[in-house]
Image (tube, rainbow, N blue to C red):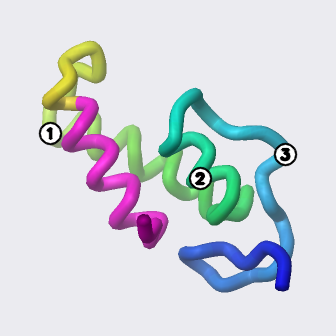
Amino acid sequence: AGFRCSRCGRPHGQLESRPFKGALGEQVLAQVCSVCWREWIGMGTKVINEMGLALADPKSQEVYDEHMKEFLQLVE
């Protein structure tokens, strides 16, 4: 019955638009609140820096996406 964030369980604060294109962007829009998304932005920056990811590389993008899915508790 309506939106509930996959990570924190809050029933409010849904993002106003998808944060990026594609199916994963749609999944984030449908399942993640704005507070948890902002938390991921900070954590995502750490993931990129600590793992030395170059997001132009498809393998690096895949690693980044997996960390994001885990952090945000996204289920397929």
Magenta stretch secondary structure, dominant: helix
Is 4 left, or right, of 7 in this rendering? right
Write down the residue under mark 1: 51
What residue is pinned by disc 3? Answer: 16
Residue 36: tell me if it is visible.
yes
What's the distance in space between the residues labelled 3 and 2, CA to CA?
A: 11 Å
Above/below status of 40 relative to 21:
below
Q: CA distance from mark 3 to mark 1?
A: 30 Å
The quadrant of the picture occupied by the C terminus is bottom left
Characterize the local packing of mark 3: few (<14), some (14-19) or many (20 or more) Cα atoms within 10 angstroms.
Answer: few
- Of the pair 30 and 61, the residue shown nearer to us: 30
| Amino acid type assigned to the residue bearing label 2 in the image | Val
> Mark 3 is on which residue type?
Glu
Q: Which residues are magenta?
A: 61-76
Residue 30 vs 56, above or below: the answer is: below
| Element type at mark 1 | helix
Q: Is residue 55 left or right of residue 29?
A: left
**20 vs 43, nearest the viewer:** 20
On the image, numbered disc 2 is attached to which residue?
28
Residue type at mark 1 is Met
- N-terminal of the pair, mark 2 or mark 1, is 2
